[in-house]
Amino acid sequence: MTSTTAKISVQGVTKTFALGRDTFTALDDLSLDIADNEFVTVVGPSGCGKSTLLNILAGLEEPTAGLALVDGVPVSGPGPERGVIFQQYALFPWLTVRQNVEFGLRTAGVPKAERRRRAEHFIALVGLEQFADALPKTLSGGMRQRCAIARAYAVDPSILLMDEPFGALDALTRVKLQEQLLDTWSKDKRTVLFITHDVDEAVFLANRVIVMAARPGRVYDVIDVSWTTARDERFRLSPEFAALRNRVWHSVYHQDGPTAAPQPSTTI
Amino acid sequence: MSVLDKRGAGRRDPVPETTPGTSTDSGAVNAAERAPRRSRAGRRGLPLVLNAVSIALGIAIWWALASAGFKLPTPPEVVARARTLIDNGTLGKDVVASLTRVLIGFALGTAVAIPVGFLMGWYAVLRGLIEPWIQFFRTIPPLAIIPLAVVVMGIDETPKIFVIFLAAFLACVISTFQGVVSVDRTLISAARVLGAKDMTIFVRVVVPASTPFILVGMRVGLGSAWATLVAAELVAAQQGLGYRMQNAELYYDLPTIFVGLISIGILGLLMDRILLLAERRLTAWQERR
Ligand SMILES: Nc1ncnc2c1ncn2[C@@H]1O[C@H](COP(=O)(O)OP(=O)(O)O)[C@@H](O)[C@H]1O
Ligand SMILES: [Mg+2]
């Protein structure tokens, strides 16, 4: 495995959870490289270990075996170069939008004035200027997720790990946030690992779609998305998009016997 | 409790039944339901009128029963006695004596309960060490501690304050602990990926997230403290509302007993309202469904 050029390199990662006296294999010998500034989406059936993979990269969980490398260095705990965006927003409900966005800057010891300035910038980037002093409970789901994105961006991570960030939103809001995310990403490139269970979303956003299979969790298929011009409605409605969508769909929903890896006996 | 069951289940061993009676439960439910902010001035008027009607009705029934020959003092008798007791300073002194005990006991109980509750929630080892004792003492009514407290601590203020302390401590420590173990794991993860270390997570996530639980615990604790007061003042007190009632009992002095009861009720209600107000202030960020 050549990982010298990869921004993120997952090498033979296995993760098992104790389940009573048994163990449950959530990830089985999973390998995967992601290049710098690449936008990778991961799609797969529920329970195939997508979140587990993301948590390992985030440093929130440790692999049972194998290595997760970021910039060639094994992950040990969370780090400021990796921003995480959770499906359930995970905003601190007692803090205002601004205070939420400043949270990471505060822990990093950024002085107050600078904190303010950076928070303002990222709040404006996600269009929440008018709600800077609002509490999360007063925001809609889409606004909360934008706030969470601003909070992650504020610490200026070179990697964004996003776990079904738009999964809880309605279709219209989701499409809007997808476009905003791509817009932000194309202006200010970062390496993104974006988890979703939505095939359209996976294709629309990605340079590369990774399809996972469940029981045990592993990479089932990798599909390159080589659409070089702007990702907008035209892409969404193009025959190329339809073809890719078709391909990914089949990979996700028709994961049948022959290609699947052998089931370990301990799997439940 | 329900919040806790949902989250606690996956990540730790099941949370033990730690609710003092059902009072914490109802307190927590109240806290969740109470302030959907929809009570505008207009809608608020009706319940107030109903409350006033209910109180007037209660007094009327009391009066009727007293006149019908039940062994009760009439409201005017009680008011007259209250006036006498206020004028000769007895009631004032009793109230001060009782309030002092309750407030000292309650303040000490809370001040110890909150850090202990946090430590129990944060460190599984401490929880394992402390919890059996809390569960044990919870099953003993404070009244039953009094003989021991008197023998060990003498008959001055110490044993009285001690039992009130114990009552407040037990109620508050349990809900603080529940608050800590039910902090949303995702919030802790979010703080960690934003670079927070244990101490920061504790101060900036666990403490604020537990505040609603702590405040409910404080209210329950204040209730227990106040309830324990009368029992505590049976211990050779020279002053205090409980003592006054106990003393009145010797002389079949029902009006004085009534004045004592009503004073205890009103003071308890006032203190509860003050805490409720604080609670609403401090937990305004909570989403209420
Ligand atoms: N802490 C845990 N303990 C036990 N099993 C877990 C734990 N976390 C995840 N799992 C199991 O691992 C599998 C993969 O979970 P997850 O990564 O959350 O899947 P996905 O995000 O793809 O839906 C699931 O079957 C889940 O039940
Ligand atoms: Mg998941």
Image (cartoon, coloured by chain):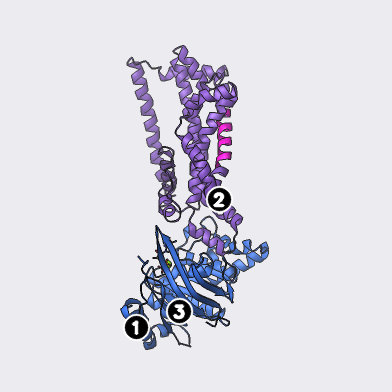
Decide if residue A181 is on the left or right side of residue A262: right
In primary-sequence order, the first of circles 1 and 3 is: 3
Query: Marks 3 and 2: same chain?
Result: no
Give the residue pinned by disc 2. Answer: B207
Residue type pointed to by label 3:
Leu
Q: Position of residue A137 (x, y in %)?
A: 47, 57
Residue type pointed to by label 2:
Val
Chain B is shown in which shade? purple
Q: Residue at x 51, y 72 (%)?
A: A66
Q: Chain of mark 2?
A: B
| Tag shown at residue A205 | 3
Q: Chain of mark 3?
A: A
Indicate the quadrant where residue B47 lies. Answer: top left
| Magenta segment | B100-113
**Disc 1 element:** helix
Q: Residue at x 55, y 39 (%)?
A: B110
| Tag shown at residue A246 | 1
**Disc 3 element:** helix
